[in-house]
Amino acid sequence: MTGRAGNSASWRRTDDVTGRPWTGRVREYDLLKELTIGVVVVGLLVLGVAAIFGSPDEPSVSLKTWAVAAPADFVATAAKELGGTSDTAGYGPPYNSTPDASQKIGPVDLQSLSGVRLPVDTAQDFVVGPLESLPSPPAPLAEWSAATDQQRSDWTSAYSDALAAAPDNDPAKVADGAYGPVPALTGALLDMARQGTLDGVLQGGGNFYNMDYTRSLLFLGDGSYFPDLAASQHLAGDQWGVMNETGDTPGQSWLWLFSLLYQVEPFKSSPSVDALAVLTMVVLTALLTLLPFIPGLRSIPRRLPVHRLIWRDYYRNR
């Protein structure tokens, strides 16, 4: 042992070059200059590629876009909002207290635990309120306000049926009927949306700065135009949309497990699919977190020697 230690020390004394002066080539190196050149070159490259190819993202969709591109769908959706028959109107918590609308797991009503935190009255918030904000509100608003709930329901139901039966669902081709002020109100809202005013009203929220797009997105989602755009880009839930970007660009591959639950039974056909998916992810996350402490599970890596395949060279030499 002593001889080996001595030889090792001697080797370090004779072969250690850290204390010797450098005798190779020497040239000046300006780190700041190199950094500046790198930033400028990369910046010009990014700007050039951006100018040639543009952004890969689709332009944002607004209520104005919808009203211009699909006026019939906009009017039909506005009629449903007035009549309280849209998806948002029947969603349940946190938007409203629609009976039997929430998702449950057995007797546990998870969706209702937080209550109605973001109250949304579709008729008032999406149609009547925005029209009342105009400098000259439409006169038919008074007739709507003075009507009973039953009258309003009858008007909107009759008009929605007439729209569905009209050629191309065109509001201008709807047959005469007892629709009350509904055609006038939905027509005025369509004009408001085409001018771009409705976007500002629904997103304003009474604040100077606003980042809350809840009501705009709910209104858009109640129609067919926005969901159809999503489906055309393969972004719908039944198309593994959470794993896709717009067009053919792949998205976040690490989200495959979340999206998988929406594609298989019994999740796929369950009315409580969201609650079941959340519960499943909570259980799986808990199992992963507690894996080192669970007998049997913690022994799986040792009993399934996958590591021997990965480090097969090491184990072959052993």
Image (spheres, helix red, strand yellow):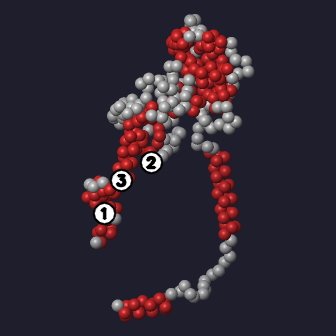
Q: Which is in the foreground here, disc 2 or disc 3?
A: 3
Q: Which mark is residue 308?
A: 1
Can you identify the residue that label 2 sits on?
254
Of the numbered discs 1 and 2, the one sitting upstream in the chain is 2
The image quadrant that residue 138 belongs to is top right
Name the image quarter holding the C terminus. Answer: bottom left
Q: Which is in the foreground here, disc 3 or disc 1?
A: 3
Whether residue 158 is visible to the viewer of this picture, yes or no, is no
Of the numbered discs 2 and 3, the one sitting upstream in the chain is 2
Of the numbered discs 3 and 1, the one sitting upstream in the chain is 3
The image quadrant that residue 152 belongs to is top right
Along the line of sight, the residue nearer the viewer: 60 or 277: 277
Mark 3 falls on what kind of element?
loop
Q: Which amino acid type is shown beneath numbered disc 1?
A: Arg
- Give the spatial CA distance, label 2 vs label 3: 21 Å
Q: Which amino acid type is shown beneath numbered disc 2?
A: Trp
Badge 1 vs badge 2, beta-carbon distance below 8 Å: no
Left or right: where 127 falls relative to 275: right
Q: Which mark is residue 290?
A: 3
Along the line of sight, the residue nearer the viewer: 131 or 246: 131
Location of residue 187 with respect to 176 vertically, above or below: below
Mark 2 falls on what kind of element?
helix
Whether residue 6 is visible to the viewer of this picture, yes or no, is yes
Residue located 53% across and 25% down the image: 223
Residue located 37% across and 49% down the image: 286
Badge 2 vs badge 3, beta-carbon distance below 8 Å: no
Location of residue 134 with respect to 290 vertically, above or below: above
What residue occupies the far right of the structure in this picture?
Answer: 135
Left or right: where 275 falls relative to 15: left
- Give the spatial CA distance, label 1 vs label 2: 25 Å
Location of residue 220 with respect to 249 vertically, above or below: above
Other residues around mark 1 within 10 Å, as few (<14) / some (14–19) / many (≥20): few
